[in-house]
């Protein structure tokens, strides 16, 4: 161990901690998971697709886990969450879908 210490080219005195660069909120990338959650949530409510509502709930969770800008992203995530929960409630507890008559 002592032989490798003398030949070590690194300089511990020159090490500095990493500081992340400051990014403006308008320069952040688009939250695709939040956008997809809104689309699936609206499809779940409007067309009464159970799968759409469940997928909206999953994408909402992903969007919350990856949230960077709390002020802007929280509004979109909460809207998508309301659409997905409204879709699930109307699909499971609402009136039955009209059946096709042949």
Image (cartoon, grey):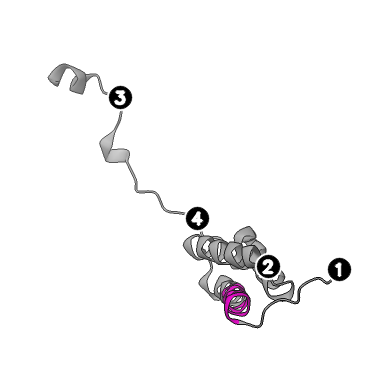
Residue farthest to the top? 3
- Mark 1–mark 2 Cα distance, whole angstroms, equals 22 Å
Dot 4 corresponds to which residue? 21
Mark 3 to mark 4 CA distance (whole Å): 28 Å
Q: Position of residue 99 (x, y in %)?
A: 76, 73
Q: CA distance from mark 3 to mark 2?
A: 62 Å
Distance from label 1 to label 3 (Cα)? 82 Å
> From this viewpoint, is residue 61 visible?
yes
Quarter in which the N terminus is drawn: top left
| Nearest-to-viewer mark from 1 and 4 | 1
Could you classify mark 4 by the number of other residues whose Cα lies within 10 Å: few (under 14), some (14-19), or many (20 or more)? few
66 on left or right of 32: left
Residue sitting farthest toward the front? 102
What residue did someone put label 1 on? 102
The Cα atoms of the two marked residues, 1 and 4, are separated by 64 Å
| Residue nearer the viewer, 13 or 60 | 60
Chief SS of the magenta region: helix
Q: How many marks?
A: 4
Please identify the quarter of the rendering in which residue 47 is found. bottom right
In the image, residue 90 lies in the stretch drawn in magenta: yes
The first of marks 3 and 4 along the sequence is: 3
Is 39 placed above or below 13 here?
Answer: below
Q: Is residue 28 magenta?
A: no
Labelled pair 1, 2 in contact (Cβ < 8 Å) = no
**Which mark sits nearer the N-terminus, 1 or 3?**
3
Residue labelled with disc 2: 49
Dot in front, 2 or 4:
2
Mark 3 highlights which residue?
A: 9
Q: Earlier in the sequence, mark 1 or mark 2?
A: 2
């Amino acid at each position: 161990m002592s032989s490798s210490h003398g030949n070590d080219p690194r300089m511990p005195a020159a090490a500095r901690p990493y500081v992340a660069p400051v990014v403006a909120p308008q320069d952040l990338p688009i939250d695709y998971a939040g956008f997809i959650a809104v689309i699936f949530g609206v499809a779940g409510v409007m067309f009464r697709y159970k799968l759409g509502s469940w997928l909206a709930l999953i994408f909402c969770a992903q969007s919350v886990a990856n949230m960077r800008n709390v002020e802007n992203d929280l509004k979109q995530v909460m809207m998508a969450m309301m659409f997905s929960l409204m879709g699930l409630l109307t699909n499971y507890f609402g009136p039955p879908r009209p059946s096709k008559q042949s």
